Image (cartoon, coloured by chain):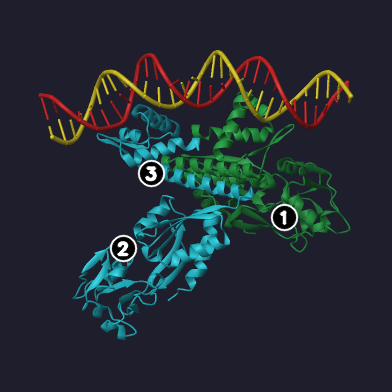
Chain colours: A cyan, B green, C yellow, D red
DNA sequence: CAAATCCGATGCAATTTTTGCACCGCGTAT
DNA sequence: ATACGCGGTGCAAAAATTGCATCGGATTTG
């Protein structure tokens, strides 16, 4: 849309940190871009960039403005969706940021189920760690976020929450497999494979062990839940995952046992959206469908 | 703001009902305007005007779009206000649509009280009948509406409500002045001076008398509460007003008595805003101040 | 029933706006 | 001290917008 051109340039400058670099990115001359910025600031009535010796940076007014434009852009898309709806096209697009744990089983199943009923709806599923998922909402890059234990919770409206007890994953023959519940300290006696600290499960475990005499000493630390899960098949170690991410096909040789909530309180898996935002119809409906499905996982 | 130029043109075309007339209004050629509309529709992806033999009219998609633009425009102003705030200018502007009854005493006092504390804040007070006040909110021409018994209440969020019993206004020597409360049917025995049917008091009285054997027969019907009130000083008739609009300076020779709520239920004086909207800081604060003041008038 | 009227659309030239290029002054970094 | 990268600016080229004249179509008018 033509009338948001200025915003695209402003955002580019913000990202690049300098008008010249941004001009390069946007295939335009620095002078042209410079003047666009100046003209905009004049019309707006206030400067939005601080001029630094090595470039420019958004000032607080600029931050406010960028946030406004982002809202505006997402609203425009929502209106377009609504118009598409009433012209009978009946399509729609859902963007969701979610934790890695959701990616193998839970979310694919839910998206497929939804698409079975609404084939015209398309999806963008972004795997994000819990901090990045929130950032995605704030920048309007995702309509929804489904994430375990979000970090900041500012501008985050919770649509649904289910508690999730952390499970230890192990081979079927593992010594701990004989118990129906595992104490956290028992885990420390075995080799463990953990997600890196950006992930909620790791964070929860470190919180739980803060002040304890023994600490986590992962033999493997990874960003890939998939990698860790498969690693367990080869070494007699422990990995950890929440129920929505668990499922053991026959013959995998793996099993899981819950960690006692006395040691490790259950985390909350939250479905949320940007506070105060009106979601596009497709996303709002899919959120409803997700909420129903999440209730079945209340652990 | 330059980037909303298209919207201004679209709105002009909507109002004028034809591109040519709108072009005239906006001091531009019809062809230029026509092409702007076409280009916009192309970018937007959908037509927003129906082409009729005698002009154009917004289609449903266009209605949605116009509403979107109005929101956007008001949001932009809010952001500008916020920016003004953080640059230390500490100014602000409040727009409020209100019933005529509020205009002589209640609202001037409230606005003055608020400005005494916040001298930088400016006001636009628009006197509107109850239907027009709501319309003002919807079109974002006012931030707030303070109105007795609004008509539609769609997209209307109530911020505060106080009941208002209708009072009869009369000269001090009037036969009914001896009673502490007046029955509605008694009023019919005297000449009465009524607001026209666009006003809530008139509407409430007609509702109350619907199906009754006797009906209202105003000797004077007027749009001006001020006129009616002063008219009573010259003829021994009755007029009607709600408490917030009442105050008799010594020597006016007028007085008022409440109509029994058995005959005429109290109406609600509502302070409201457009549903889902975030008000500019100045308006939000003034609304808070109004809410406090309104509580004193709970009748 | 035909002429007149009013409408939106469009080709083309005039005008305004935007862009690119060259260059300035300035502060930092080397 | 010099070189580099930055934002800002004058001026000409390029692009977009506008105005004018005109078309084709539908309604209104006489």
Residue that carries the numbered disc 3 in the rendered image: A63
Label disc, if present, on residue A221 of the rendered structure:
none
Is there one chain holding both mark 1 and mark 3? no
* Residue A196 image position (x, y, % from top left): 27, 63
* Residue A9 image position (x, y, % from top left): 40, 36
Disc 3/disc 2 C-alpha distance (Å): 34 Å
Residue that carries the numbered disc 2 in the rendered image: A224
Disc 1/disc 3 C-alpha distance (Å): 50 Å
Side of B121 relative to B183 (left or right): left
Instruction: Identify the secondary structure beneath mark 2.
Output: loop
Could you say which is closer to the camera, residue B204 or residue D7?
A: D7
Residue that carries the numbered disc 1 in the rendered image: B166
Instruction: Identify the secondary structure beneath mark 1.
Output: loop
Disc 2/disc 1 C-alpha distance (Å): 71 Å
Quarter of the rendering containing residue A188: bottom left
The answer, for residue A195, to whether it is visible in the render is yes
Could you say which is closer to the camera, residue A205 or residue A68?
A: A205
């Amino acid at each position: 849309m033509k009338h948001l051109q200025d915003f695209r340039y402003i955002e580019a400058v913000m990202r690049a940190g300098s008008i010249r670099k941004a001009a390069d990115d946007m295939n335009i001359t620095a002078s042209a871009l410079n003047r666009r910025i100046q003209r905009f600031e004049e019309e707006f009535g206030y400067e939005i960039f601080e001029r630094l010796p090595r470039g420019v940076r958004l000032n607080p007014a600029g931050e406010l403005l960028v946030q406004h434009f982002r809202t505006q852009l997402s609203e425009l898309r929502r209106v377009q969706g609504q118009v598409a709806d009433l012209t009978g096209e009946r399509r729609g697009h859902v963007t969701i940021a979610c934790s890695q744990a959701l990616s193998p089983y839970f979310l694919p199943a839910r998206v497929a189920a939804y698409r079975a009923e609404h084939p015209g709806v398309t999806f963008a599923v972004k795997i994000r760690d819990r901090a990045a998922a929130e950032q995605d909402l704030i920048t309007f890059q995702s309509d929804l976020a489904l994430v375990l234990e979000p970090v900041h919770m500012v501008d985050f409206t919770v649509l649904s929450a289910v508690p999730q007890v952390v499970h230890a994953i192990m081979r079927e023959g593992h010594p701990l497999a004989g118990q129906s519940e595992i104490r956290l300290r028992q885990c420390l006696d075995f080799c463990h494979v953990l997600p890196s600290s950006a992930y909620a499960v790791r964070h929860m475990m470190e919180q739980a062990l803060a002040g304890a005499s023994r600490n986590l000493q992962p033999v493997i630390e990874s960003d890939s839940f998939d990698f860790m899960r498969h690693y367990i098949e080869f070494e007699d170690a422990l990995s950890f995952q929440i129920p929505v991410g668990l499922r053991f096909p026959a013959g995998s040789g793996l099993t899981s046992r819950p960690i006692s909530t006395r040691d490790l309180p259950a985390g909350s898996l939250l479905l949320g959206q940007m506070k105060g935002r009106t979601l596009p119809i497709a996303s709002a409906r899919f959120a409803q469908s997700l909420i129903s499905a999440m209730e079945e996982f209340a652990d």
